[in-house]
Image: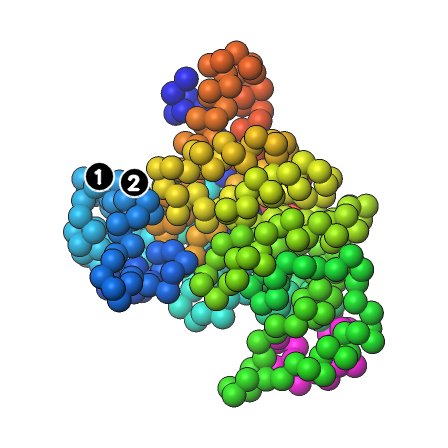
């Protein structure tokens, strides 16, 4: 079966970010392309990567260029159109109907969820970042006594469809099997100090653990960053298997826990999704970074992860190219996996369509228990 025969329809992107809608010179574009800080001073370019090749192959035609136009021609065309119009074309071509946007990155260049939804003619919902809320409470001068109540109140009144933890970035994924007590939290907060700019940047195992447990207590679907990310992350501490005590302790709470990205631990995450009722996963970010090789990633994930546990996400950030690539490459990869099963007589056509629908949108609608549109 040709993968184009399996029409996934509009996608629910359950983890993504705002876009930079300013015109970008090459160095700025490359610094947003992936999780490196930018092109290497030692003379390499991120266009010579699976991601860079995929931009030239799949994004160039959306901007009216031949496939595989040079990087220089591509970036010139992007500026000629204007970043906003180029982004509109790319996001629209991604075919995403619903965006669940992590609004926790403090970067004034990023557009709002509302702008993103307009670019894609879809709807957007907010996922609130636990650490950003907590840091805001500390920045506002709340002492340890008021901290817990104020964080809980801000989460409850946020209107967000879920909460996200970046414990992986700050302290790693050794979340404990019990919620830190009020006394433990107070003692931990005594160690937390603002930086030279007067703002707080949390990096305390007890506080991150308390935040993750608070999301569970408030019954907010909890997204956890897992696996690779920016280069300030210690990947060794980001294997999802480190979450096992936390997952075992939360499995009867009925609150979904969503493991994001996961690469290169996607098989470990797939196992956890199979083993624990409340665990779901995605391979966002990794799909566009692995470009034409991403089908293997999706296939390896589905070796043991049930179809009812895999969600679609782009983890697009900054560049609209990552929306287009995340969606297109994921459609293609899932189409290849399911299409192969169909060709081999392992499933019926109706089952292929049903399983693809779970991953494309229905799992997200079930997990977030909100009217996602
Ligand atoms: Zn992200």
Along the line of sight, which residue is nearer the eye, 220 or 172? 172
Classify mark 1: helix, strand or loop.
Answer: loop
Indicate whether residue 144 is drawn in magenta: yes
Q: Is 42 left or right of 165, judged from the image as shown?
A: left
Determine which quarter of the picture holds residue 280: top right
Residue at the extreme front of the image, as rendered: 236
Q: Which residue is mark 2?
A: 58
Mark 1 and mark 2 lie on one chain; the one further toward the N terminus is 2
Separation of marks 1 and 2 at Cα, in angstroms: 7 Å
Dominant secondary structure of the magenta stretch?
A: helix
Q: Is residue 74 above or below residue 210?
A: above
Indicate whether residue 329 is drawn in magenta: no
For ligand 1, tell me if the residue under mark 2 lies within 8 Å: no
Query: Over which residues does the magenta segment extend?
Result: 135-150
Q: Is residue 9 visible?
A: no
Classify mark 2: helix, strand or loop.
Answer: helix
- At x 58%, y 59%, the residue is 237
Q: Is 287 left or right of 24, judged from the image as shown?
A: right
Residue 64 percent location from the top left of the image: 21, 43
- Which quadrant is the N terminus positioned in? top left
Q: Is residue 222 visible?
A: yes
Mark 1 touching mark 2, by CB under 8 A? yes
Q: Which residue is mark 1?
A: 67
């Amino acid at each position: 079966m040709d993968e184009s025969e399996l029409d996934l329809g509009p996608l629910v992107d359950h983890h993504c970010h705002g876009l930079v809608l300013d015109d970008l010179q090459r160095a700025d574009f490359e610094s947003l392309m992936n999780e490196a800080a930018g092109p290497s001073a030692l003379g390499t370019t991120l266009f010579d990567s699976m991601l860079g090749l995929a931009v030239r192959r799949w994004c160039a035609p959306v901007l009216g260029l031949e496939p595989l136009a040079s990087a220089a021609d591509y970036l010139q065309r992007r500026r000629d159109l204007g970043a906003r119009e180029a982004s509109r074309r790319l996001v629209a071509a991604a075919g995403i109907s619903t965006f669940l946007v992590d609004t926790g990155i403090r970067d004034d260049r990023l557009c709002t969820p509302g702008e993103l939804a307009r670019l894609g003619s879809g709807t957007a919902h907010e996922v609130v970042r636990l650490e950003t809320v907590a840091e805001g409470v500390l920045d506002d001068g709340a002492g340890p006594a008021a901290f817990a109540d104020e964080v809980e109140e801000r989460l409850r009144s946020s209107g967000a469809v879920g909460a996200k933890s970046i414990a992986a970035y700050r302290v790693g994924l050794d979340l404990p099997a019990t919620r830190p007590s009020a006394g433990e939290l107070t003692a931990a907060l005594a160690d937390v100090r603002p930086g030279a700019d007067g703002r707080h940047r949390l990096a305390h195992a007890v506080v991150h653990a308390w935040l993750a447990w608070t999301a569970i207590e408030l019954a907010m679907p909890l997204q956890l960053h897992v696996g690779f990310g920016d280069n300030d992350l210690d990947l060794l501490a980001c294997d999802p298997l480190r979450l096992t005590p936390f997952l075992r302790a939360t499995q009867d709470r009925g609150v979904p826990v969503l493991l994001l990205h996961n690469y290169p631990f996607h098989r470990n995450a797939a196992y956890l999704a199979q083993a624990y009722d409340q665990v779901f996963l995605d391979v966002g970010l990794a799909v566009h970074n692995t470009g034409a090789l991403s089908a293997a990633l999706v296939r390896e994930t589905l070796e043991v992860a049930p179809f009812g546990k895999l969600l679609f996400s782009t983890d697009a950030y900054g560049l609209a190219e990552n929306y287009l690539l995340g969606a297109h490459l994921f459609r293609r990869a899932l189409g290849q996996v399911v299409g192969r099963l169909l060709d081999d007589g392992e499933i019926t056509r109706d089952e292929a369509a049903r399983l693809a629908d779970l991953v494309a949108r229905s799992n997200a609608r079930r997990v977030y228990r909100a009217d996602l549109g």
